[in-house]
Image (cartoon, rainbow, N blue to C red):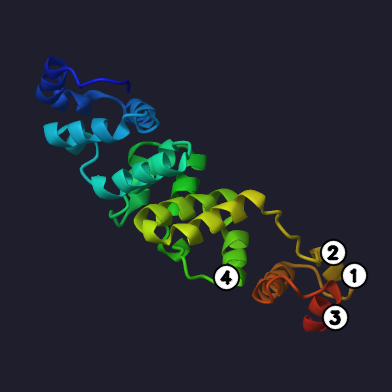
Amino acid sequence: FSDGELDPAGLKASAALRSGLARLSAERVWMELKKLLAGRRVDAALQAMSETGVLEQILPEASLGVVQALVRLEQAEGLEPEALLRFAALIWSHPSGRELFHRFKMSNDEMQRLGSVLSPVARLNPDMSASERRRALYVAGRTAFADQVRIAWALAPAAGDAWRSMWTMASEWVRPRLPVTGDDLIAAGAPPGPALGRRLKALEAAWIASDFQLSREALLAQAGLA
């Protein structure tokens, strides 16, 4: 957690007694792991945990490469550490993150945030056009998009200018509002019910595909209600 070298005797004792971690509750392990992941010395701590078998004891799915890259990025760009994001990096190569979420008995908010980062569908690339970036930001939301950018940036630091632009875009973004509502559709003659929601979803998809340019009138016309 702090500066200086790790205490040799303490490290040796931690390694010798690591099996005792199995007696701790999942909630306690997760709470302590989050504290460690938010620390300034997380890279040194995780390396020591890996070398002594402590990390294997609590998280055998962990791999240090991505989280080390993320820490380097944070230090180079002056980014505040995010424990959840560092955990996502730690299990980046594991195909079933959700099983780990339940193992540690994470909160719904934690599971939702981690799920949005780890979803293969959400992966970004630095060559996305401006309209593709806007669509991805709208679908993901500000926090999830910024999380995805930070991980992608750590994995491909050579594209720093593109990632930095996307990071700034997320911080300045004001979410656009769909020009039509369910009430608008009903007022224009659409019957209420489950089909109304599907109709509205289809119009939203068309509006997103238009780079948010379709007007209320154009959307109602597309729905056959103008």
Q: CA distance from mark 1 to mark 4?
A: 33 Å
Tell me the quadrant of the picture where the C terminus can be found.
bottom right
Q: Residue at x 25, y 20 (%)?
A: 4
Percent across and percent down for residue 176 are 73, 60
Confirm or deny contact between disc 4 and disc 2 (CB under 8 A): no
- Where is 174 relative to 189, above or below? above
Q: Between marks 2 and 3, how big is the CA–CA gap?
A: 13 Å
Query: Where is mark 3, residue-wise?
Result: 225
Disc assigned to residue 132:
4
Q: Secondary structure at mark 4?
A: helix
Which quadrant: the N terminus? top left
Residue found 78% across the figure and 80% down from its top: 223
Circle 1 SS class: helix
Q: Separation of disc 1 and disc 2 at Cα?
A: 6 Å
Q: Label 4: few (<14), some or many (≥20) within 10 Å?
A: some
Is disc 1 in contact with disc 2, using a CB cutoff of under 8 Å? Answer: yes
Q: Secondary structure at mark 3?
A: loop
Q: Is residue 98 above or below residue 192?
A: above
Q: Nearer the viewer, mark 1 or mark 4?
A: 4
